Amino acid sequence: MKPVRVGICGLGTVGGGTFNVLTRNADDISRRAGRPIVIEQVAHRSIHPDCDITGINATTDVFEVANNPDVDVLVELIGGYDIARELVLTAIANGKHVVTANKALIAVHGNEIFRAAHEKGVIVAFEAAVAGGIPVIKSLREGLGANRIEWVAGIINGTGNYILTHMRDEGRAFEDVLAEAQALGYAESDPTFDVEGIDAAHKLTILASIAYGVPLQFEKAFTEGISRITAEDVEQADNLGYVIKHLGISKRTDQGLELRVHPTLIPKERLLANVHGVKNAIAVMGDAVGPTLYYGAGAGAEPTASAVVADLLDVARDITTDHHYRVPYLAFSGIDEDVSQLPIMPMEDITTAYYLRLLAVDRPGVLARVATILAEQGISIEALIQKEATEGELVPIILLTHRTKEKQMNEAIREIEAMADIAGPVTRIRVESLDEGE
């Protein structure tokens, strides 16, 4: 059969890995696709040192690839929002299929891109945009297609997981482990997207859209990072039988959908609690299948290239199929822009349990007043740890609460922080059981 001709835009870590996998495994890939998949052109500003493009048509202008009539599929691996959006829309306008690993692009501009692709009858594939080499998008979109998805929860940023793992195992401070992660190349020089949850929110937005059949709504995702987590929080969580993980969580409720990224205490026995280092894992609860877990390398050159090339295989298989009969981009046909029937819930309406840590003057009546404030907001205490202190010394108080609404906890924290005997802000970390029976 006629070869599928590919133009790769970006030859950095993922682009170089994709080039190498396509070249090295060309025979097996062709047999799986039923036709050869050949690299027609590449565009790059720099080239990954392990990537040899000798004899390949190369350019520094990505739009040359998008306008090349000999390219059937444009592979977008340049990252970012604006140029990537223009590049992908140009390729689509020219009738080219698109494969991308760009989670920010899909989360923010995906609705526009999918509409344009549908009008032109072309494929947009983005498995590599979430969790690197883990085929979670294909699993959600196709493998779990019989299920009503109840919730999705995942460790979908390896940098944050690396930091929390080493804080727990070695009792080190956040800043210390972050510096190590940067030195090892796991974290960028500006780690904001990773440690403040923006990267995870991009990925969670995509997963939720596929899981529940709603448009991408990144702007409605609640995002909180891990930079304020201390070694003491990690230790106290351990004492209470929990592990702190930076999770993306989406749940279906009677009021709508939850879409949130934040540090979370989860029980030690949960599978997600035992995912360490830079690995990713996503748990999905379906009404028919029950709990499933997807684990593996969430980043890196060839793990991510594995997903990119898998998408190219799908494109090669479906390239001659009428677009009305292809798997929908976001799993559901005819996703409507009106999502009033399944809105994204504001964070203040979400119910969960809480871990609280506060510093108090060691004086009679302080703890009783804290308990009263919580009770007035309808919040009950499940567990309490108070350390010994010498007279006049500030003493840490650790509280674990039962489930309550976020807005009630917000008001309780505001009142507690206003107490004269409380020093500094109250640390609040949400607690989730992620019970397989939920």
Image (cartoon, rainbow, N blue to C red):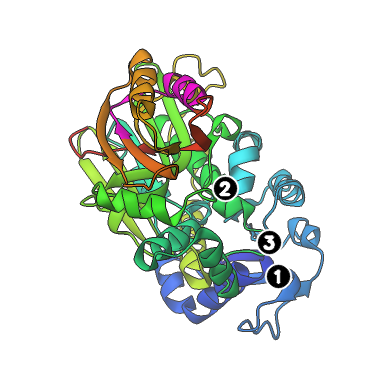
Which residue is denoted by mark 1 in the rendering? 41
Q: Residue at x 44, y 22 (%)?
A: 412
Report the span colored magenta: 400-416
Residue 109 placement (x, y as % from top left): 65, 39
| Residue 39 is one of the magenta-drawn residues | no
The amino acid beneath tag 3 is Val
Q: Are marks 2 and 3 in contact (CB under 8 Å)?
A: no
> Which is nearer the N-term, disc 2 or disc 3?
3
* Vertical position of residue 311 compared to residue 383: above or below: below
For marks 2 and 3, give the CA distance: 38 Å
Viewer-side label of 1, 3? 1
Out of 227 and 372, give the one closest to the viewer.
372
* Vertical position of residue 334 compared to residue 208: above or below: above
| Residue 408 is one of the magenta-drawn residues | yes
The disc label shown at residue 196, or none: 2
Residue 119 placement (x, y as % from top left): 64, 34
The disc label shown at residue 71, or none: 3
Side of 350 relative to 5 (left or right): left
Asked whether residue 139 is in view, the answer is yes
Residue 430 placement (x, y as % from top left): 39, 36
The amino acid beneath tag 1 is Gln
